[in-house]
Structure formats: structure tokens, C-alpha cells
Amino acid sequence: MNDTRLPELSSADESAVRALYHRALDGWNLQDGSAFAGPFSEDGEVIGFDGTRHSGRSVIAAELGRIFADHVPPEFVARVRRVRALGPGVVQLDAVAGMVPDEAEDIDPAFNALQTMIAVDAGAGWRIALMQTTPARYDLRPDLARALTAELRSLIGRGPGPV
């Protein structure tokens, strides 16, 4: 009989993967494309809220640098909901994220999102292989949309750091 359970993840690896995620969000909030891209693997990818895909750490840094030069995007607040090993050296992190527009004091529910990050450790430490942001519209479940907004609202002022 085959064992189909996913492998266990050490607390040290879970902490390292959470820190990787928060480093990327900190880079976004600092409006620094290189800081955002820093935790990614050389061939890492990011899929943005609008579906735009950027492949490669240097491309991610350049494209986000261009975005940050053109306008001030809202800051992220986020909460990690789950971290799990998918296999040896492969981890999935699931988070919820919201954005507080510049000069605003509250979450804009239109930017609420689910974020999924795949991190890999091929022997040189954890790196982000893929980070995807999906709008959390909950079209048929307005109760879930309101609950997510309330959860994210509770994070305002804490920054994207460990939660």
C-alpha cells in the first residue's frame, strides 16, 4: 500500500518559508523592486493580481522597479493561513492579503486576495519559485468577503510581518 501523506515540515523550515514570504511583501511595501525580487530563485515567477506574469528574478526586479517608479501602489497587509510540505525541499504557503491605499486608513476590499507561494530548497536555502495573487471576490458568498475584510482590517498597522 502506498503512503500518500505529505511529508512533515520542520518548524525551522516553516519559519524560514514564512520569513521568505514576508521579505517579499516588505520589498513591495518599501516600493523596492530588487528587495521584492530578492527572495525569488533565479528562475522564479510572480503572477500578479491582474494576471501579469513575470519570470526570472532580474525581470521581476526590473518590472516592479518600473511600476514603483510610475506610481505608488497600496501597501500589503497579510496573514499566513497555512504552510505545508509538498515533497522534499518543496513547500506551499497560503496567505490572505489586503491593501491599504496611499493616504487611506482602511483596507480597500477590492484588493483583497489569496496568495499562494511555492518555495524550494535545492540545498542552498529556501527561495520563492512561484508567488501568485488571486483576487478574493467571493461573488456568491458576500459573507466570506466581509469576514476576510474584517480579518485583514485587524492587521492594519502591523505591516506584512509574521502573523
Image (cartoon, rainbow, N blue to C red):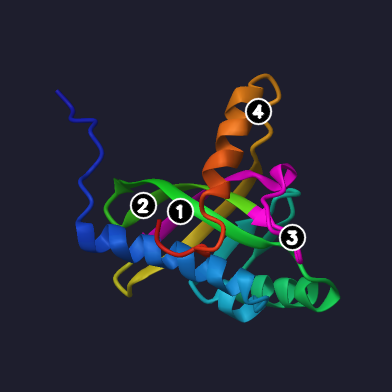
The percent position of residue 53, horizontal first and vertical second, equals 70, 56
User: Where is the N terminus found, in terms of image quarters?
Assistant: top left
Within 10 angstroms of label 2, few (less than 14), some, or many (20 or more) residues?
many
Q: Which residue does the numbered mark 3 point to in the structure image?
A: 104
- Residue 120 shown left or right of residue 26 in the figure: left
Q: Helix, strand, or loop for circle 2? A: strand
**Image height of 78 relative to 158, above or below:** above
Res 75 → quadrant: bottom right
Do tag 3 and tag 4 residues touch (Cβ < 8 Å)?
no
Q: Which residue does the numbered mark 2 point to in the structure image?
A: 91
Q: CA distance from mark 2 to mark 1?
A: 6 Å
Q: Could you tell which of marks 3 and 4 lies nearer the N-terminus? A: 3
Q: CA distance from mark 3 to mark 4?
A: 24 Å
Point out the stretch of residues depicted in magenta: 99-120
Residue type of the residue flagged with mark 1: Ile
Q: Could you tell which of marks 4 and 1 lies nearer the N-terminus? A: 1
Furthest residue in direction front, as rendered: 105
Residue type of the residue flagged with mark 3: Ala
Do tag 1 and tag 3 residues touch (Cβ < 8 Å)?
no
Rendered residue at 66%/24% (across/down)? 142
Rendered residue at 76%/49% (across/down)? 50
Q: CA distance from mark 4 to mark 1?
A: 23 Å
Q: Could you tell which of marks 2 and 4 lies nearer the N-terminus? A: 2
> Which disc, if any, is residue 138?
4
Q: Nearer the viewer, residue 122 or 66?
A: 66
User: Is 144 included in the stretch rendered in magenta?
Assistant: no
Residue type of the residue flagged with mark 2: Val
Q: Helix, strand, or loop for circle 3? A: loop
Residue type of the residue flagged with mark 4: Tyr
